[in-house]
Image (tube, rainbow, N blue to C red):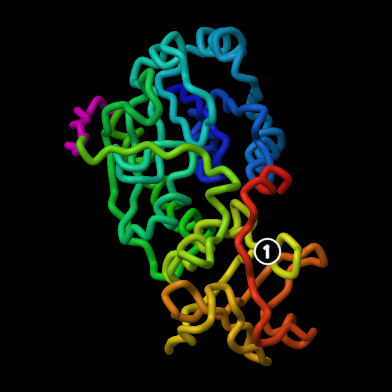
Amino acid sequence: MKIVLFANHLAILPVINYFYSRGWLSAVVSTDKLHGENLQIEDFCNQQAIPFCKVIREELKTTVLSLLHQIEPDLVFMCGFSYRIPGEVFSIPFLGFYNIHFSLLPAYRGPDPIFWQLKNGEQTGGISIHKVNAGFDAGEVVAQQEIPFIPGENWGICNSRYIPIAFNMIKQLAEKLMVGDRIPLVPTDHVAGSYYPKPGVEDLALEWDIQTSEQIEQLVNACNPGANGAITVFKQQMVRILEVSPVDGTGDPSVSGGSIVHADSSGLYVQCADQKLLRINILRLKEGFMTGFKLAALGVSRGDCFENVVVKNLSTI
């Protein structure tokens, strides 16, 4: 059995280790966009002397195509790979070319499904494995598992929860394909299909005058840690909010959204557009990461205000 993995996402690391330990892994292909913690993929491959190929988009029909013709893989899995796979490539493996996607397809197709599901306040997400075709996340689904979101979880927690589940799904599918089991397609509701692009800075911006406390909490959770926090302005400085907590009680109808209504050793309490309150737990300023209660100790007080970002300034972040 010869398997090739296409991956820019750390979720694939347990899969790399498993297929390598079984002697099935022939190569790992990544892109020039590999960065951050995902560089562990390259590090692991180098440590284990696993053939590793990092390519730009234009090399998919040259370097990658040549590599796959040389290996003649039986099976290919892809996770977080940021380039569309040409037909000349995805048609090569005899047992199929499959992508792992962190949503219940066809809903939330696109490069960052966890972000959009958390921002939109979905109660349930999941993992899909689908055949790769000429579209983005548009191939026939062969495996799918529904996973409820945990109230208050952020992007990082959700992503970490999905990794072992995705590993088991890939392992089970590979084993079925190897013994020739028939893989039935998963019925999907294409009427409910949706596509979301990579979040832009405008998607990360808090709007205190219109967003409810729930919407602000959802956006903050969606931005932590992948987007480095939701964007706001405080005392003419662009800051990022990484964690908030809902608070019982209501604010003052005469106070605008974003206003700090209380500040003490327990933190900063901010009123939202629906007059509900959030405690600001963790922020990132130019001085570094800080807790809300540290800012209170430094003199931030009732009446200070978080403000919306001016749209024309977003490109400078």
Please indicate whether residue 39 sits to the left or right of residue 252 in the image: right
- Specify whether residue 118 is painted magenta: no
Residue at x 56%, y 14% (from the top left corner):
60
Identify the residue position indicated by label 1 in the image.
233
- Who's the residue at 31% across and 26% down the image? 139
Coordinates of residue 12 in the picture (x, y in percent): 51, 41
Quadrant in the rendering for residue 169? top left
* Residue 126 relative to residue 301: left or right: left
- Identify the residue at image location x=62%, y=27%: 31
Give percent across and percent down for residue 246.
47, 79
Please tell me whether residue 183 belongs to the stretch shown in magenta: yes
Badge 1 local density, few (<14 within 10 Å), some, or many (20+)? some
What is the number of callouts on the image? 1
Nearer to the camera, 34 or 41: 34
Q: Which residue in the rendered view is the most extreme toward the front?
A: 254
**Which residue range is magenta in the image?**
179-190
Q: Nearer the viewer, residue 88 or 2?
A: 88
308 sits to left or right of 111: right
- The secondary structure making up most of the magenta span is loop
